[in-house]
Amino acid sequence: MSDLTDLQIDELKLHLAQRLRELKAEIRDALVQSDQQHHKDLAGSVADTGDEAVADMLVDLDIALADRHVVELRDVEAALGRIRDGSFGVCIDCGNAIGHERLSAYPVAKRCIRCQQRREIVYSRGTTPTL
Ligand SMILES: [Zn+2]
């Protein structure tokens, strides 16, 4: 269980939904700037799509220009999905609540600070931990 109040979740959800709209607009702009017709068609599809699965639609396409936005879009969509299924605000590694302070700064966080720091240490060493 997360330790967020309904109000806090609502605020974070609004924030995520706003970011989702910004990202879609940025991806659409990037696609529109491309002079290839199928990209323009795709841009139209993005504009018409609801909140679901835009990233899935884009993921098969090799559009380097929009890649970074697509990665973030997927994170934001995943976070909104966790709000819907009730797992938002819970660390996927240890199951403890992720603090509201951390989620305010970083609403797509999937891990609590302790697990995230442990993960970053492991990754920065570039080795697989032995148990
Ligand atoms: Zn954790």
Image: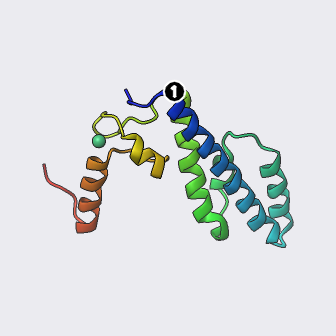
Residue located beneath label 1 in the image: 6
**Structural crowding at the residue carrying mark 1, measured as other residues with C-alpha within 10 Å and reported as few (<14), some (14–19) or many (≥20):** few
In the rendered image, the quadrant that contains the N terminus is top left
**Position of residue 26 in the picture relative to residue 35 (left or right):** left
Compared across the picture, whether 41 is left or right of 20 comes to right
Q: Is residue 66 left or right of residue 109?
A: right
Residue at (82%, 66%) from the top-left corner? 32
Asked whether, in this view, residue 28 is left or right of residue 129, the answer is right
Q: Is residue 54 visible?
A: yes
Which coloring applies here? rainbow
The picture quadrant where one finds residue 80 is top right
- What x and y, as percent, mark residue 57? 69, 49
Q: Nearer the viewer, residue 130 or 19?
A: 19
Q: Residue at x 46, y 28 (%)?
A: 5
Q: Position of residue 27 (x, y in %)?
A: 71, 61
Q: Residue at x 66, y 48 (%)?
A: 18
Q: Is residue 106 visible?
A: no
Check the image and report above or below for 18 versus 61.
above
In this view, which residue lies farthest toward the left?
131
Task: Give the vertical position of 100 relative to 86 (above or below).
Answer: below
**Mark 1 close to ligand 1, CB under 8 Å:** no
The secondary structure type at the circle numbered 1 is: helix
Picture quadrant where residue 53 is located: top right
Whether 46 is drawn above or below 67: the answer is above
Q: Amino acid at mark 1?
A: Asp
Q: Position of residue 13 (x, y in %)?
A: 58, 38
Q: Indicate the quadrant of ligand 1 in the picture.
A: top left
Residue 35 spot, x, y in % from top left: 84, 73
